[in-house]
Image (cartoon, rainbow, N blue to C red):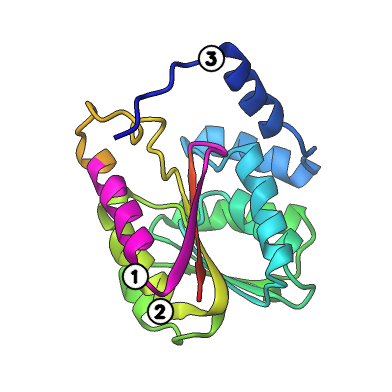
Amino acid sequence: MKAQQPQHPAKHSSWAYAEQHAEEEPAMTDARLRAEDLGVRPPSQGVAALLTVLAAAAQAHTLVEVGTGVGVSGLALLRGARSDAVLTSIDYEADHIQAARETFRDAKLPSSRARLITGRAGQVLARLTTGAYDVVFIDADQAHCRDYAEQGIRLLRPSGLLVINDALDHDRVPRPAVRDDSTQTLRSLERALQDDERLHTSMLGTGTGLLIAARR
């Protein structure tokens, strides 16, 4: 095992600088305020910007999101996707779905661009068409993350992208002494995706960690 690298102030400064690289539109800023009111933690500014780039690079037409939140990630994905792209976004909390609707309305997105579903992600994902999606974004509780990831791989077309938010569990994954259930689950998920011959993977330090996998 590699020795742990010491924390360096310049490294943190570079991370913080990169996080605020892209200026956000007013609808996104208002969504973050909405998140504070609901006690929701949306993806960071850096994660949102990267989601836009990934959706653009994939020329995404069909997208799936597990964990709607207040619509920050959904808006970011749709901003990068094709102009006729459709996002299917799943969240168990009805007030999150309503908040996302407000975010998309503020952003002047046509209602046809986002299919917002209140329900259990495992059940909804199982009903979606195999190999029909360009991007699957997972921002959900770690306990079910591995199941969602496996469903996500099934849904992706060749060269489609699976993106998992908070994959470093707020900097706990790189620390071997941390043995929390959530941390061990994410370590196991990382290994499983690395070993999966269907995928190419990368771990990024953006936000609280993004695990990205491309379907072969």
Q: Which label number is shown at residue 154?
A: 2
Q: Where is residue 91 in the image (x, y as percent from the top left)?
A: 43, 60
Stretch in magenta: 184-208
Q: Mark 1 points at which residue?
A: 150
Name the N-terminal-most of marks 1 and 3: 3
Q: Is residue 207 magenta?
A: yes
User: Please, what is the three-letter code of the amino acid marked with disc 2?
Assistant: Arg
Q: Is residue 160 above or below residue 47?
A: below
Residue drawn at 61 percent across, 58 percent down:
74
* Towards the viewer: 96 or 61: 61
Which image quadrant: the N terminus? top left
- Label 3 – label 2 distance at C-alpha: 40 Å
**Which residue lies under the disc numbered 3?**
8
Question: Helix, strand or loop at disc 3?
Answer: loop
Q: Is residue 201 visible?
A: yes
| Whether label 2 touches label 1, CB < 8 Å | yes
Residue at 34% over, 25% down: 3
* Amino acid found under the numbered disc labelled 3: His
Instruction: Residue 213 in the image: state x and y as whole percent.
Output: 49, 62
Q: Is residue 196 above or below residue 144?
A: below
